[in-house]
Amino acid sequence: MNYKKISIAAVTAGMFAAGSAFAQTAEIGTWSGFRKGAASFTFDDGAPSHVTDAGPTFKKYGYKATFNLVVNWNPNWSGFQGLADEGHEIASHSNTHGQNMSGEEASSKKAIEGKIKQKYGIITVAYPNCNVPNESAVKQNYIVGRICNGSWKGMGDEMGKDGPSNWAQVPATMTGAEGQLKSTNDFTGRMQKVIQSNGWAAFLTHGFQGKQNGNANYSPTDLNAIDGALKWAQQNDKDIWVAPMGHVAMYLKERKASKVEASSSGGNITVKLTHNIADNISKYDYPLSIRVKFDGSKAEVKQGDAKLESKIDGGYIYFDAVPNAGDIVISGGEAPKPESSSSVEATSSSATEASSSSRSHHHSSSSTEPGLSSATEALPMQAIDGRHLVAYVDASGYITVQNAQGLNITVFNSLGNVVRTTKGIGMLQKVYTGAKGMYVVKIGNRAWTMNIK
């Protein structure tokens, strides 16, 4: 089964009175979007081709990856910051890439955090030469410590729905000329395997055949094989969740530690989603996918001041919510109506481009269309209050934002009409999905233009 089910015991009928709360059944998806399996693409050594070739390839399909950098190899810091600003995860691969990074666990994390700004800093580490360093130091600094092929250590190469037995030894399968995965079919075969097992697969890639790889010259991989794998994943997005290693780890740890309770009263359903994870690395506020029994045809879902994207299907209402961010209230609602609005005003913007979705949704940067302010032309990414905001259309056709906690978010259509207003909540948030066309997402005083096709 691809969900964690929390059944609330039935209460005897005599205990119910008019207006009292009735128990509901709420479920947490094993993987985001109630998909059947998960996959993470990880890239080692900070190759120039990771910025020039991998980044655009992932952008084309609306997916994000993990890039593990070696401090002393002086990677293209601005280029990797650009990838972080597009929603990718930047991680550590040590200071020196020696035989064993023991003693560099904390210092490499700190050094990369001095160069790369992202919400939680550096929370994932990949070990050079696959040699596990000081596990205690790893767990004090990171939520994931990645090895290479699990089979090289007598483990499986893929993980089950509950993740690794040891978070300091998370397996990833080597790709390329010296690896086990060479072709698109090799990648898709692994993804099909974890779909069938409700598991998680991670891939380990260095440089690419025929590209500028710098020090990442071990086991070069055919970039076309990864392109084909991402295309297949997009076509099967309802089954496979592709996300950075740190994001999947946060989701998995939260899901295993979370408690969800639902009750109905006065025509509304209230859902409480909590966990007690506590460390100095992450707040664990990645959204979990929830579904609740629902027999209506329209609904509004709110968590605090945030309106959550939701869908009703098969007698359930589905949405993503953040643990410990307040009660989630589901009420009957009308379909959203565009509000009259002048053209979008913004002080700066960053156009993003990608293709998306098994539902034939794609997005890309575009010249300004009628109703869109000329201020939405691409400008350099900037931070608000030290945070690096991210907005893009993901592979399943949702306009998605990162790092927008507490900020007002407004989505405008090409006529300048408001189609969604909400508040930022959690590390990542789906804020809108709708008809084809140009949209502007305004977060605080920043705006992004994107095209859903």
Image: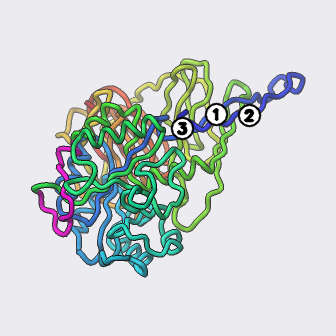
C-alpha gap between disc 2 and disc 3: 17 Å
Amino acid residing under circle 1: Ala
Q: Is residue 422 one of those drawn in magenta?
A: no
Q: Is residue 217 one of those drawn in magenta?
A: yes
User: Is the C-beta separation of discs 1 and 2 under 8 Å?
Assistant: yes
Q: Quadrant of residue 94?
A: bottom left
Amino acid residing under circle 2: Ile
Amino acid residing under circle 3: Gly
268 lies above or below 171: above
Q: Nearer the viewer, residue 142 or 216?
A: 216
Disc 2: CA contacts within 10 A as few (<14), some (14-19) or many (>=20): some
Q: Position of residue 343 (x, y in %)?
A: 30, 38
Q: Residue at x 28, y 51 (%)?
A: 180
Disc 3: CA contacts within 10 A as few (<14), some (14-19) or many (>=20): many
Q: Quadrant of residue 51?
A: bottom left
Q: Which residues, given as a range, are shown in magenta?
A: 211-227
What secondary structure is marked by label 3?
Answer: strand
Q: Quadrant of residue 278?
A: bottom right
Q: Position of residue 162 (x, y in %)?
A: 54, 48
User: Is the C-beta separation of discs 1 and 3 under 8 Å?
Assistant: no
Q: Does residue 23 appear left or right of residue 445 in this picture?
A: right
C-alpha gap between disc 1 and disc 3: 10 Å
Q: Which mark is residue 29?
A: 3
State whether residue 79 appears in this view: yes
Q: Position of residue 141 (x, y in %)?
A: 49, 70
- The residue that label 2 is drawn on is 8
- The residue that label 1 is drawn on is 26
Number of marks in the rendered image: 3
Q: Does residue 435 appear left or right of residue 334 in this picture?
A: left
Callout in the foreground (1, 3): 3
What secondary structure is marked by label 1?
Answer: strand
Q: Position of residue 353 (x, y in %)?
A: 23, 43
